[in-house]
Image (tube, rainbow, N blue to C red):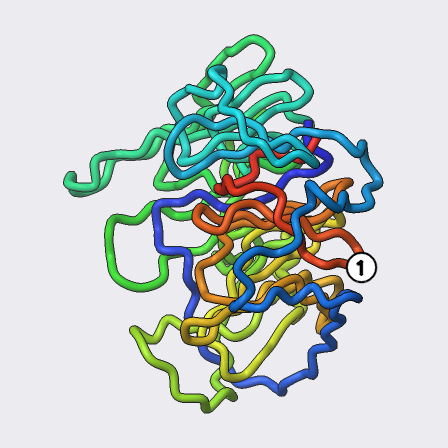
Amino acid sequence: MPEFRTRLLTILVIPVVASCGASRATALTTRSPTPSGTLSATTATPTSAASTPATSTASANCRLPLVPSTGTAGFISYPGGTFRADPAAAIKTKANGLAYDRGFARWLPVPWALVSSDGRHYSYGEYPDFSTYPLPDSVLHVVDVATGRDRIVARGQYVVSDYETEGIYLTQLVGGHDGPGPQIGALLNVSTGSIRQLTGGAQYGYVIGGGWGWQAQFNTADTTTHEGMGFWTNELFAVRLTDGSTTRWFYRPGVDSVDVIGFDRQLNPVINVGTGNSAVILDLTAPNAATQLWSGPQGTFWSALGDGVGIWLSGQAAGTYLWTPGGPLKKVSASGGVPAGGCH
């Protein structure tokens, strides 16, 4: 299995939060790597990791499982950077993504968020035809990786969002609509099939990592004029899964969007902060403390994953990059997509 699991939510609602509530701004301490980990938007070709291997706490040679937006998933060799599709990855996804289960040397038809912490099971949902009203219940499944046994564990108006040790986190099922959709708000007991509403209500954000739900909001103390539909976010809260209590980790007036795109090895969130057509990517190492990994055009990188090698950033057009402690960010491969597990 990978050194840790990136907890990215796969749901059928729009993953943007727009909530109001003024609060006092807290200064963010940003620690830039030395040399600078900021990659200039005008830099066409960053330093290649193939020619200057990064220091690693893992093996100097490994393979990073990668799911491109088109074509078959496979592996990027490190430090060489060559991508090779794996015929074994030519499987139909059940939840908009794939994961490579290192413990079983097997591709799974769901993203890592829907795989159990030990890699032995995964979950997915069968969702109704949204043209039907009222909506029939979803059918929620758990699959044993070793045997392939697929069992139905529950039914209800829910979407499978994340599989943790304590159970499967669920989001309310909704049809198509404009604006932000519901957040994670319920927990499914895999053994009994019972579903309970979380203590803090349905306000746990859209992504789980490190034992927290991550909830982006818009702080109305920010008087900056923004363009677009009004679904802006400028701060990020960690929501305790046990009781719904919150701790603000990030706030920056003037930005248009704050999105969790992955987690580092310590399961701290890596975020994309967008302002107009520009963006910065930060590794939030603690509340109000961050390391800047990159800056440049908005939409360059889709996902981030931390492992024993460093933090991988990947985007379809940009390719795949690696940041190691101390930086700088280096291009490893021209192939990009979504990392499906740690480099091994």
Q: Position of residue 163 (x, y in %)?
A: 57, 36
Residue assigned mark 1: 326
Count how many numbered circles sit on residues in the image. Answer: 1
Q: Position of residue 25 (x, y in %)?
A: 63, 85
* 10 left or right of 144 in image: left
Residue in the foreground of this view, choosing between 292 and 175: 292
Q: Position of residue 88 (x, y in %)?
A: 49, 15
Which residue appears at 44% of the width and 59% of the height?
299
Which residue appears at 35% of the width and 51% of the height?
13
From where the camera sits, is residue 63 visible?
yes
User: Quick one: label 1, few (<14), some, or many (20+) residues within 10 Å?
Assistant: some
> Please, is residue 143 above or below residue 292 in the view?
above
Residue lying furthest top in this view?
147
> Please, is residue 139 above or below residue 24 in the view?
above
The amino acid on which the numbered mark 1 sits, given as a three-letter code, is Gly
Residue in the foreground of this view, choosing between 289 and 204: 289
Corner quadrant of residue 28: bottom right
From where the camera sits, is residue 197 visible?
no
Viewport quadrant of the N terminus: top right
Q: Position of residue 309 (x, y in %)?
A: 75, 42
